[in-house]
Amino acid sequence: MPEYTWSTIQTARGEQHRYRDTATGRYVSAASVRGELDRFVDKAGRESARALTEQLRDGKIALPEWQTAMARAVKNVNYAAVAAASGGVENMTAVERGRAGGIIRGQYAYLRQFAADIESGKQPLDGRAVRRAEMYMQAGRGAFHAQKRAGAADAMPGQRLMVRSHRHRGDSCRTCIALNGKWFAMGDPEYIPVGHRECNVSCRCDEELGTMDIDGIITGLGRSSF
């Protein structure tokens, strides 16, 4: 990824954070950072998850070795995703590091089940296993948005926070289409977050946060905001 620094700026919508490209001096939108994360996640899927599972299939590594290496990749991807939504590793608070740890532990539990399914023969070592392995890397997208939502709640206590989805042109699952552009209160069970829809962790939709005042007027924070 390019070299960015983390800055606090004043906008018409209030105080917000932005990354600044150290080479150009320009501010970088959250959508652009998400694009960099997408490329990182896709690369991890190809070079880590796919490669490891193919090595396991070909008998080049044993199941325990595969599980250990996959766990390392899961940790790296999800920690990087939370860090990207927090201003970088050097700016993460103890709360954010703990949040990343919770996400990673959840993925470890799924990974243990994956390994158990392989060992029992329930999960054949074919293309389906490779695809399942890649999904563990793609889960980083959901971790990024989970941290953005949590970070906004931490930064704006007492405010009624809102969220809406912006559909990616390549995502056409039923839920992505239905949610596109509609505001929901944060925590509303009718809002399905990125990574939990029919398209699962491959979802590339974006999320925008906002606030609602006492008159019910919603002010979006913009897709560039953190």
Image (cartoon, helix red, strand yellow):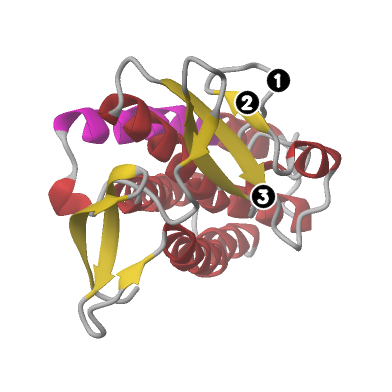
The reply to whether residue 194 is visible in this rendering is no
User: Which residue occupies 44% across, 45% down?
Assistant: 144
Disc 3 to disc 2: CB gap under 8 Å: no
Q: Residue furthest bottom?
A: 23
The quarter holding residue 23 reads bottom left
Going 45% across and 61% down the picture, which residue do you hit?
A: 37
Q: Nearer the viewer, residue 194 or 139?
A: 194
The nearer-to-camera label among 1 and 2 is: 2
x, y percent for residue 22: 20, 78
In this rendering, position of residue 35 left or right of residue 150:
right
Q: Is residue 101 magenta?
A: yes
Nearer mark to the viewer, of 3 and 1: 1
Q: Residues within 10 Å of mark 1 (few under 14, many from 20)?
A: few
Amino acid marked by disc 1: Glu
The reply to whether the magenta stretch includes residue 86 is no
Callout 1 secondary element: loop
Residue 224 pos. (x, y %): 43, 56
Give the residue number, with chain letter if any, for mark 3. 203
Determine which residue is flagged by label 2: 184
Check the picture and name the quadrant holding the N terminus.
bottom left
* Residue 190 - label: 1
Q: CA distance from mark 3 to mark 1?
A: 17 Å
Left or right of 149 in this view: 52: right
In the image, the segment drawn in magenta is 94-112
Label 1–label 2 contact, CB within 8 A: yes
CA separation, marks 3 and 2? 19 Å
Label 2: state its secondary structure.
strand
Pointer 3 or 1: first along the chain: 1
